Image: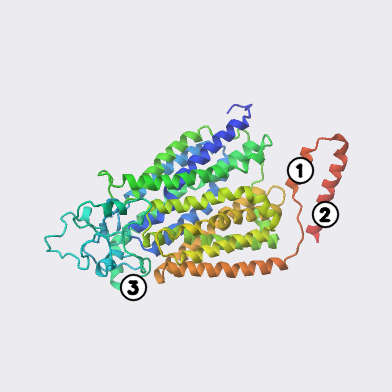
């Protein structure tokens, strides 16, 4: 931009909308399906929890540092482009991670043909890793359509045993909803089972994501576990270091750009475009993976297609970022805004209680993000249905947004927050009782309240409690540090709960935790002092909108009075 930039707000907002839309598609390519891919590699629930917890921890700590450095050295555009291109390359490193014990999963073509698959020569079970194929072949469900007798596994010397184990046998620690195809012609039953909305062929869920207590498994699989886990950890951390700062740097750049022309009110609605991009992207990538997974050039687990798509969309987003609005001038700003925001939280009991609530929310929400697709896969859901469930929740949040003023008039902020926590608890309880491949869809309708309405209340409470100049640092702290820290802790703990018990116990436990915390929150909130803080941003906005010279004196009077009231309340 030139030394005297021309502030074209309309063009800047158009580019920002396109950027958020493309970035939404980009995030939807991998983020919802990442833990499912780690499961296809053979990693058990505790290791997946450690990986995801580390990912959230890196994002919570590293993003603010990069944002501060990019702003201080005026390298925002360079960071945007570098983050997109770097993450496009770093994501492809995940494709290089070898599956556990070298077994490659090739279940995608088996599913598309409507034929179940079974496992290769089996070894001892790995704790926390599903072995549904083995269970199913030993105790097949009654009435399985068009299947030969799978009650007896082929022996090593059996001439009917397939000669190419890579193409014919599933990974014993891979996708739990698949079994091995035996030779059979294509029938109408097979084509019917391949319908994208139907259940993925596989056995019913028993306790597939629970622990398999086998002491021998750890020793026999230690070498494969070490390489798969350590490579996944290293590549995932490197990838997160490159991608984590993107959203925060883009938001800060656009907000400051609009602040120069007093158009920050138009910044509030850009999140809609990101949700639209995620809704479209999560369904599109699931359908694309189902179509392309059987190509002969695709090797390894079917999840690698998610990373290829992510890289392509990241490159497209980098082209849009070249035109992304970045302010040429930098206003002087105190470097201790984060510390000031932290002191504001520590001095306000309402914000302390809200911070604990957001931390608890992050811990519980991480169990849904990490293991809900595992639970759906155990019940035979296809990836297209998984994508549709995420899109249904996001679209519900978008449709609820026009009702936000009416909802806030009917309920207080505490009431909306309690309603959101209650809906999330009901969702978790429902997840623990899933009975079929489609049964998750009704619960996703509650996502509008447990996601959208809940964060409306959090944002309103943060805005109410903020002091001048700390609104955005406080919002970033609640969404990045407190929520991200909760997601990290929840991921670490959730994986071991799944290993020790199962997913149903995990979701019921989270439901109980939320209900107990909701009771504590409402009880403590009612006992806190009701002192109302002065919202300076709203006062200054009212002052700027009134241009009458005859009322300037009175406006100064009420502003001075408000500052005196605030000073007295602090002093008291």
Residue found 38% across the figure and 57% down from its top: 381
Q: Which residue is at the front of the view, 331 or 452?
A: 452
Q: Label 2 belongs to which residue?
A: 565
The image quarter containing residue 483 is bottom right
Quadrant placement of the C terminus: bottom right
Q: Which residue is mark 3?
A: 213
Locate residue 284: give its quadrant. Answer: top left
Image-quadrant location for residue 123: bottom left
Q: Which mark is residue 540?
A: 1
**Horizontal side, residue 16 vs residue 109: left or right:** right
Name the N-terminal-most of marks 3 and 1.
3
Regarding residue 22, the answer to whether it shows in the image is: yes
Where residue 173 sits in the image (x, y, percent)? 30, 61
2 or 3: tag closer to the N-terminus: 3
- In the picture, measured across the screen, residue 220 lies left or right of residue 308, that is left
Dot label at residue 306: none
Above or below, 227 against 556 in this view is below
Residue 325 in sight here:
no
Instruction: Please tell me which residue lies in front, 323 or 289.
Output: 289
Question: Residue 130: x and y, percent?
Answer: 33, 65
Classify 345 as above or below 74: below
Q: Count neighbours of disc 2 (C-alpha within 10 A) and say few if under 14, some if 14 to 19, many if 20 or more.
A: some
């Amino acid at each position: 931009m030139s030394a005297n930039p021309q502030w074209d707000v309309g063009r800047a907002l158009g580019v920002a909308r396109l950027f958020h839309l493309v970035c939404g598609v980009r995030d939807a390519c991998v983020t919802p399906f990442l833990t499912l891919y780690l499961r296809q590699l053979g990693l058990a629930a505790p290791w997946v929890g450690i990986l995801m917890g580390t990912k959230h921890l890196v994002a919570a700590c590293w993003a603010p540092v990069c944002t501060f450095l990019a702003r201080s050295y005026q390298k925002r555009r360079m960071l945007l482009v570098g983050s997109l291109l770097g993450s496009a390359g770093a994501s492809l490193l995940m494709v290089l991670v070898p599956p556990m014990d070298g077994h490659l999963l090739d279940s995608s073509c088996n599913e598309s043909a409507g034929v179940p698959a079974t496992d290769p020569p089996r070894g001892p079970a790995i704790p926390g890793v599903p072995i549904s194929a083995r269970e199913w072949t030993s105790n097949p469900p009654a009435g399985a359509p068009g299947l030969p007798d799978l009650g007896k596994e082929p022996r090593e010397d059996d001439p009917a045993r397939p000669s190419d184990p890579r193409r014919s046998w599933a990974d014993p620690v891979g996708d739990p909803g698949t079994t091995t195809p035996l030779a059979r012609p294509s029938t109408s039953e097979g084509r019917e089972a391949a319908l994208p909305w139907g259940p993925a062929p596989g056995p019913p869920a028993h306790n597939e994501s629970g622990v398999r207590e086998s002491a021998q498994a750890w020793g026999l699989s230690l070498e494969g576990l070490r390489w798969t886990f350590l490579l996944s950890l290293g590549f995932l951390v490197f990838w997160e270091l490159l991608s984590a700062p993107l959203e925060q740097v883009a938001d800060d750049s656009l907000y400051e750009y609009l602040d120069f022309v007093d158009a920050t009110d138009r910044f509030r609605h850009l999140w809609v475009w990101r949700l639209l991009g995620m809704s479209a992207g999560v369904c599109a990538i699931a359908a694309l993976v189902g179509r392309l997974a059987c190509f002969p050039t695709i090797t390894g687990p079917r999840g690698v297609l998610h990373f290829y798509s992510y890289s392509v969309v990241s490159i497209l987003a980098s082209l849009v970022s070249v035109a992304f609005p970045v302010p040429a001038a930098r206003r002087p700003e105190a470097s201790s805004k984060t510390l000031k925001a932290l002191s504001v939280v520590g001095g306000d009991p309402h914000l302390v209680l809200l911070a604990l609530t957001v931390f608890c929310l992050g811990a519980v929400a991480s169990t849904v993000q990490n293991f809900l697709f595992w639970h759906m896969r155990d019940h035979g859901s296809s990836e297209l249905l998984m994508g549709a469930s995420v899109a249904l929740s996001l679209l519900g949040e978008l449709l609820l947004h026009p009702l936000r003023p009416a909802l806030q008039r009917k309920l207080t902020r505490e009431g909306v927050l309690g309603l959101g926590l209650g809906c999330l608890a009901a969702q978790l309880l429902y997840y623990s009782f899933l009975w079929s491949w489609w049964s998750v869809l009704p619960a996703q309708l509650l996502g509008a309240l447990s996601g959208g309405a809940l964060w409306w209340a959090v944002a309103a409470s943060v805005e109410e409690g903020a002091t001048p100049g700390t609104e955005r640092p406080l919002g970033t702290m609640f969404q990045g540090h407190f929520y991200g820290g909760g997601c990290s802790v929840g991921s670490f703990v959730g994986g071991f709960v799944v290993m020790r018990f199962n997913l149903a116990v995990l979701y019921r436990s989270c439901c109980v935790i939320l209900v107990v915390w909701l009771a504590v929150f409402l009880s403590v909130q009612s006992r806190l002092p009701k002192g109302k803080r002065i919202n300076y941003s709203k006062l200054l906005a009212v002052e700027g909108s009134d241009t009458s010279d005859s009322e300037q004196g009175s406006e100064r009077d009420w502003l001075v009075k408000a500052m005196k009231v605030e000073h007295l309340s602090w002093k008291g």
